Amino acid sequence: MNDQQPRVRRDHSAAIVGFFLLFVAGVLFYDTYSVDRAVAYGVGPTAMPKVISGGLAILGVLSLLSAVKGERFEIESTDWRAVAIVVAGFLTLTVMIGSGAGFIPAMTVLFTVTSYAFGRRALMADAAIGVVLATLIYLLFSKLLALSLPQGPIERLFG
Amino acid sequence: MESFHALMQGFSVALTFHKLMYASLGVLLGTAVGVLPGIGPAVTVALLLPVTFKLDPSGSLIMFAGIYYGAMYGGSTTSILINTPGESASMATSLEGSKMAKSGRAGPALATAAIGSFVAGTLATFGIAFLAPWMVKFAVQFGPEDYFALMVLAFVTVSATFGNSPLKGMISLFLGLALGLIGIDKLTGQSRLTFGLPELLDGVEVTTLAVGLFAIGEALYVVSQRQEQGEMMKLSGSLWMSKLDWQRSWKPWIRGTLFGFPIGALPAGGAEIPTFLSYSTEKRLSRHPEEWGTVGAIEGVAGPEAANNASVAGTLVPLLSLGLPTSATAAILLAGFQQFGLNPGPLLFAENAQIVWTLIASLFIANVMLVILNLPLVGLWVQLLKIPTPWLYSGILMFAAMGSIATKGSVAELLMLITFGIMGFLMRRHDYPVAPMVVGLILGPMAESQLRRALQISLGDPLVLVQSPIAVVILLVAAVAFIAPFVTNTRRFKAEED
């Protein structure tokens, strides 16, 4: 795989989008059966989902048709590894918030990992910046603006 | 003169210290995010919504409007000095602006952009002050079927008419509409598309979607590209415009305003169309055709900059008087109003007249602040561009996560955010517009309830939708707007979010 050179290649995204839209349309339509349809007048809660489901199905078919026509589309080379690192960093933050590790450590990890994905290699320096930033944000928003941010062992030190 | 009196009262509140603080905070933030790549006014306001939850409503709204105006000023600085527009509305400016900077005339380019923005912003704010109350008088006669027709028109213009590809725009819109269905149906209390998950009962927050699509999506896109940042031009040339510069600038300012304000005010939205219209008009009318594309023509900066500011003001007219957002930023502003229990529309002018007029007065004040902030201090703003890209995007992600953690703090919310982020990245990569999705999410449920209200009143007779002459006219316009892109070639320019 050579990710360095931009290349023109056949774009399969329209086909994938087409199938995805048909799937969503199906989910929407299926869901209307779980809704109780007793309404006195006019349209009930299932009418709009059906309309939108129909619209999505039509768009899905159109998208599949455009894929069959095989429109060429230039896709710039993509650094998937970097994208995956950023996503992984964000998921780590999610797990840390969920497990009660606290706001500051979670934010520090997010900051450091994202900087790494963007090509920084000075991990310790970035972590230090992350800690300072996260602490400042925490103090500003929780003390000054009285927002409740998740607390872990570190945050409890601030009282 | 009723409006004039109300406006003066608005000024008396807007000029108090407290409100001035909010306005200056807004314009500072707005200019900063306008200058910085990767974060626009929509995301900034979306991130601030949870933070301002406990603050003064009118102050917060003043701040949001300041951000919106400020971003338009700040955007010109980036597009002139590094030829990478901070937001899409500044794309036209960068064409001639960067040429001027290359040939050593960055100073006058920045000056005509800032002063032009001021002129246009001020004229267009007068436009709001006089047009909005008039629209309200008109809008009080609107029935639910008329509102429904208006929303259909907004759907069509936002998604199909002005994008690169009507199909991609419609796909984005319909996915937004589908997201809008999630949660409890307001009329019957039934839950839809929640799949038994309690986290989904409240539905998808507009701010979560916008922050995910715009901020996280943009960060993922930039990291996937490994882009080198464009070379920054030196801030050269006097910041003062010569007499000739003034002579060449004032007419483009006025013409730009005349393009920007009405197009912004129509439920068509987007600042890109008027900026490019202004650009091509000025190019045609210019007496110095040899400068275009070579050393840079000042008219090509003056016109589009005026147009983009005027169109921002224009989008506030349907937002305030009809409750109809016509751009992603306006959709977020609407969410801002709703957060404070305020519903833009004719009733807002009756019930919360003071807030509306204070907001409009603040827009005048914000314009004055912005021209002062942007002309002499432009050198300071340029320093912002020296923040290394990794830290900039790490910081943006931190704030994106913070906004979500502060509102709900739930794992489900964070997972939704990153999912929307990945979606935004893929959409951007494959050239699907993002704004229709945001507009679909916020307008979809509103359109549904108007439709159902109309049909309840008519006892289920669907003909009610075409019995009101207003609704018929609007629906016809929508039909034309839908067919137009297939017939004519309106896709000369790329329309993107904001």
Image (cartoon, coloured by chain):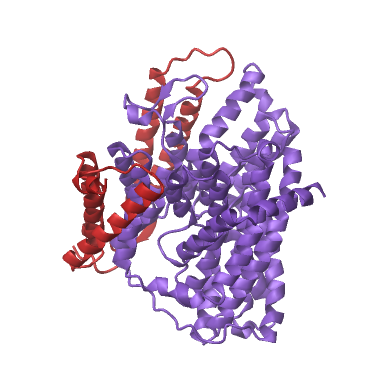
- Count of labels shown? 0
- Image coordinates of residue B49 in percent, x first then y, are 46, 46
Chain depicted in red = A
In the rendered image of this protein, does residue A140 appear above or below residue B371? above
Chain depicted in purple = B
B204 left or right, relative to B188: left
Residue at (60%, 38%) from the top-left corner? B151
Asked whether residue B468 is in view, the answer is yes
In the rendered image of this protein, does residue B377 appear above or below residue A52? below
- Image coordinates of residue B395 in percent, x first then y, are 33, 59
B295 left or right, relative to B400: right
B137 left or right, relative to B446: right
In the rendered image of this protein, does residue B477 appear above or below residue B454? below
Point out the residue furthest to the front here. Answer: A159
Asked whether residue B170 is in view, the answer is no
Task: Classify residue B107 by image quadrant.
Answer: bottom right
Q: Depth check: B201 or B351 in front?
A: B351
Residue at (29%, 61%) from the top-left corner? B224
- Image coordinates of residue B398 in percent, x first then y, are 32, 54
- Image coordinates of residue B267 in percent, x first then y, are 63, 47
Task: Classify residue B448 by image quadrant.
Answer: top right
A130 left or right, relative to B304: left
Task: Classify residue B446 by image quadrant.
Answer: top right
